[in-house]
Image (tube, rainbow, N blue to C red):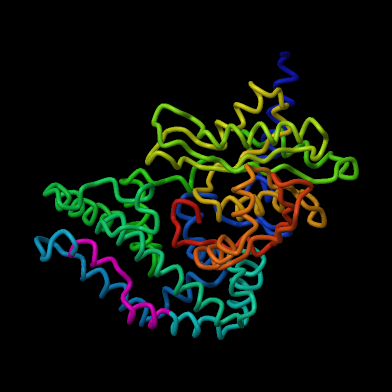
């Protein structure tokens, strides 16, 4: 390839990894902060820090300053009991802490300029708090804070105290909580986190830093991987989306969900191969111009293989699907988040919102996806229904129309919020 051609390709790639599209945002919103592990899981903190006037208001609040000092004094300077739980408990947001912060945030929200800077320009258009869209501005902030504080507590409970998460087989702490070394590890993390205090810290920064550090120590940084999502491996396909004549095909994309193996040597589960064969056949028959493969590093626990990456590889090498016709959604860990993350990807990448995509799977999984059991699980685990389902052209498919409510962030699921 000539140098000029390389330069042109780089220019295209750079244009795609900047701005709203690369950051996977709803139409009309562009986040004013970096797309990092911490901001993916705790977007409220990033928005507060980015909103004009908020840092000064929070630093000037004597009650919040006292709370910060009180919380800092809870961190043990030496031995404590019962250990090691006491080392982690110092960073937990108590019910009293959460209620106090809610009250102080309402005080700041009483200033209209502050309310507009945070809620009107950030929280509402970002979609990350869509579950609370019907609330007043002050109530939305209060609800988002309570949800985020509870999520910080959950990270600490799971990854410092060894409490089982919702899916313990694949999401648990990687250390043995009963091992004597865990006391030394948590004590070191306490000291290191305290030493990282910065002059411009806000009241939430120490606990946020502590929780993020726990995820890093446990090698649970999935949420920060493959970013920016619509750049990198997806850049070429994202560019093709913008040039597509959507009238030429009945559906916008074929959605294929991964099925991770429990065999550590296998890269794709048995059912995954069946789903790929079905999708490749439908693509060849012209049902949609793109295939979206969805799945993270899930089974077996801590596998190095990513379902979406492996499915894309197989579609190219075994079925001859062009790379610029395949988009990867490499984060979903469950069928619930397959749906939600595909909805986000469809909307952020510019697929037409008034046309349906087509979920492709084995016939029994299609029955599950279209049934009441998964619908109830969506609400229980994510709090939203990420789109509308309708029968597809055969028993291996379901039509799927994404709903913008899918952008609601779920910080209680830190591996894929």
Q: In which quarter of the view is residue 158 placed?
A: bottom left
Q: Is residue 115 left or right of residue 48?
A: right
Quadrant in which the N terminus is drawn: top right
Q: In which quarter of the view is residue 16 placed?
A: top right
Most prominent secondary structure in the magenta stretch?
Answer: helix
- Number of dots carrying numbers: 0
Look at the image and say whether residue 222 sits in the magenta stretch.
no
Q: Residue furthest toward the top?
A: 1
The x and y percentages for residue 97 are 34, 78
Q: In which quarter of the view is residue 86 placed?
A: bottom left
Residue 193 visible in the current orientation:
yes
Look at the image and say whether residue 87 sits in the magenta stretch.
yes
The x and y percentages for residue 311 are 59, 32
The residue at 62%/82% (across/down) is: 112
Provide the residue span drawn in magenta. Answer: 86-101
Q: Is residue 281 left or right of residue 244?
A: left
């Amino acid at each position: 390839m000539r140098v000029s051609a390389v330069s042109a390709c780089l220019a295209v790639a750079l244009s795609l990894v900047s701005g709203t599209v690369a950051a996977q945002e709803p139409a009309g919103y562009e986040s004013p902060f970096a797309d990092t592990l911490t901001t993916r899981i705790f977007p409220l903190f990033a928005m507060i820090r980015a909103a004009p006037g908020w840092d000064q208001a929070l630093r000037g609040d004597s009650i919040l300053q006292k709370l910060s000092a009180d919380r800092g004094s809870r961190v043990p300077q030496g031995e404590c009991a019962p250990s090691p739980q006491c080392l982690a408990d110092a960073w937990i947001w108590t019910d009293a802490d959460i209620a106090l912060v809610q009250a102080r945030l309402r005080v700041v929200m009483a200033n209209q300029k502050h309310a507009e800077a945070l809620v009107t320009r950030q929280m509402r258009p970002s979609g990350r708090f869509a579950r609370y869209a019907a609330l007043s501005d002050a109530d939305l902030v209060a609800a988002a804070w309570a949800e985020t504080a509870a999520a910080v507590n959950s990270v600490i409970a799971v990854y410092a105290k060894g409490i089982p998460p919702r899916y313990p087989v694949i999401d648990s702490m990687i250390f043995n909580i009963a091992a004597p070394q865990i006391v030394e590890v948590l004590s070191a993390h306490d000291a290191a986190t305290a030493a990282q205090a910065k002059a411009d810290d806000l009241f939430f920064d120490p606990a946020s830093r502590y929780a993020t550090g726990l995820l890093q120590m446990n090698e649970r940084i999935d949420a920060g991987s493959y970013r920016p999502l619509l750049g990198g491996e997806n850049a070429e396909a994202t560019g093709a989306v913008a040039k597509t004549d959507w009238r030429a095909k009945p559906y916008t994309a074929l959605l294929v969900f991964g099925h991770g193996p429990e065999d550590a040597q296998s890269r794709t589960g048995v059912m995954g191969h069946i789903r790929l064969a079905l999708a490749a056949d439908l693509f060849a028959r012209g049902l949609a111009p793109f295939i979206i493969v969805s799945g993270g590093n899930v089974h077996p626990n801590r596998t190095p293989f990513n379902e979406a990456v492996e499915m894309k590889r197989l579609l190219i090498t075994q079925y001859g699907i062009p790379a610029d016709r395949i988009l990867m959604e490499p984060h979903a860990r469950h069928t619930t988040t397959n749906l939600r993350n595909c909805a986000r990807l469809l909307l952020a990448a510019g697929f037409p919102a008034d046309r349906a995509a087509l979920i492709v799977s084995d016939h029994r999984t299609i029955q599950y996806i279209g049934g009441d059991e998964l619908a109830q699980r969506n609400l229980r685990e994510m709090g939203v229904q990420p789109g509308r389902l309708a029968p597809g052209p055969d028993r291996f498919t379901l039509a799927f129309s994404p709903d913008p409510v899918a952008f609601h962030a779920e910080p209680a699921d830190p591996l894929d919020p």
